[in-house]
Amino acid sequence: MRLAPLVITGVFGLSFSAAHAAQPAPERVAAVIETFLRWAVEGQELPADPPKPAPTLPHRSCGGQLDPEHLPDVIYVSWQLSAEAQHAACNWKYEIAAHRATPLTAVEAADVAQRVAAGSIPTTQRAFFHSAPRPEGRLAVTAGYCWGSAKGTFAFRAEGPVLIGELTIHGY
């Protein structure tokens, strides 16, 4: 029957569309990466509503490999990649001096993947993020850097993402 391939194609198309519809806009992705990594790597305060100091990410020094006085130029980011892929691939980069996150081009991503596989990009230069949409345009985010991770929900304001509620911290 010819209907079966059409049904399969339609189901695949709907699931593909639904998965991409849930993805936040690139400017929100960039803002979350920038906010989180400024806190986790650079030691800046994490904006919160109500305002409160965020605890330090455990193992922020990456086992003594990260010198806070000599931070890496770039942190490569795996945004929404599977557990396996987040250890081998990156699709964003965060430039510390500019405090700016941008998506990697296909060529840059392939280069970074080769460098990760070769071991030339250490854990001090990699982070991962997973997100899920929440009501009212909020975004639940789990992010990790070196041997620590944090989970929280962000609301988007004119000044950028703001942590709403508690920040759950884990060390490995």
Image (cartoon, rainbow, N blue to C red):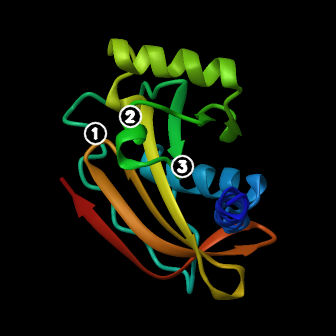
Q: Which residue is mark 2?
A: 68
CA gap between label 2 and label 1 equals 8 Å
In the rendered image, residue 152, in percent from the top left (x then y), is placed at 46, 73
Mark 1: give few (<14), some (14-19) or many (20+) Cα within 10 Å: some
In the rendered image, residue 131, in percent from the top left (x then y), is placed at 53, 64
In the rendered image, residue 126, in percent from the top left (x then y), is placed at 43, 35
CA gap between label 3 and label 2 equals 12 Å
Horizontal arrangement in the rendering, residue 60 relative to residue 91 (left or right)? left
Three-letter amino acid code at the position of disc 3:
Arg
Q: Which residue is mark 1?
A: 61
Q: Residue at x 52, y 32 (%)?
A: 76
Q: Is residue 149 above or below residue 124?
A: below
Q: Which residue is mark 3?
A: 38
Q: Is residue 165 above or below residue 27?
A: below
Three-letter amino acid code at the position of disc 2:
Pro
Q: Are marks 2 and 1 in contact (CB under 8 Å)?
A: yes
In the rendered image, residue 57, in percent from the top left (x then y), is placed at 32, 56
Q: Residue at x 33, y 57 (%)?
A: 149
Quarter assignment of residue 9: bottom right
- Which of the pair 144/106 is nearer the observer? 106
Q: Is residue 122 above or below residue 41?
A: above
